[in-house]
Amino acid sequence: MHHIVPISEGETATPNNLIVVTLDEHKAIHGGKLKIPKSKIKKVKILKDATYILGQYIVNELKKEYNVEVTFGSVTKAKRIELGLTRGHREDAFVIAGGTVQEWYFESFLEDRNVLYIKQIQSK
């Protein structure tokens, strides 16, 4: 992800200010070796707006039947750091699901016991 207008210039990490680029493209942009044409940024913003509207429609439809909440990566990251968890899909899913650090350690404890149990069975 690349911020079209840098946060240092007062912009935020809103969908309209983000563009997906590869790691090499991102390095080239920050190294001054690559510029994103304004025409491409306009097209990206139009697609993002359409994607956002579709996403809102899907969320609203789900809310009719289920208890659905929308969250953002920055919220998930802050909570993950608060809980002292490492970065990963499993950890983020745990945080998004509203898990607590006690549940995480208990789950990890059980997981460790299962691994030991499996190793004991395999060694017999």
Image (cartoon, rainbow, N blue to C red):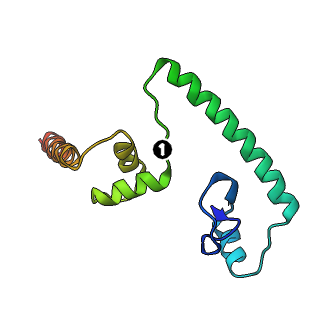
Q: Position of residue 64 (x, y in %)?
A: 52, 19
Q: Residue furthest top?
A: 65
Quadrant in which residue 94 is drawn: top left
Check disc 1 and report the residue beneath it.
71
Quadrant in which residue 49 is drawn: top right
Which quarter shows the C terminus?
A: top left
Q: Residue furthest right?
A: 39
Q: Residue at x 60, y 75 (%)?
A: 8
Q: Residue at x 14, y 41 (%)?
A: 117
Element under disc 1: loop
Q: Is residue 104 left or right of residue 116?
A: right
Q: Is residue 84 left or right of residue 121?
A: right
Q: Residue at x 71, y 76 (%)?
A: 28
Quadrant in which residue 121 is drawn: top left
On the question of residue 92 being in view, the answer is yes
Q: Amino acid at mark 1?
A: Thr
Q: Position of residue 66 (x, y in %)?
A: 45, 22
Name the residue nearer the viewer: 67 or 92. 67
Q: Is residue 15 left or right of residue 110?
A: right
Q: Is residue 13 depicted above or below 27 in this figure?
A: above
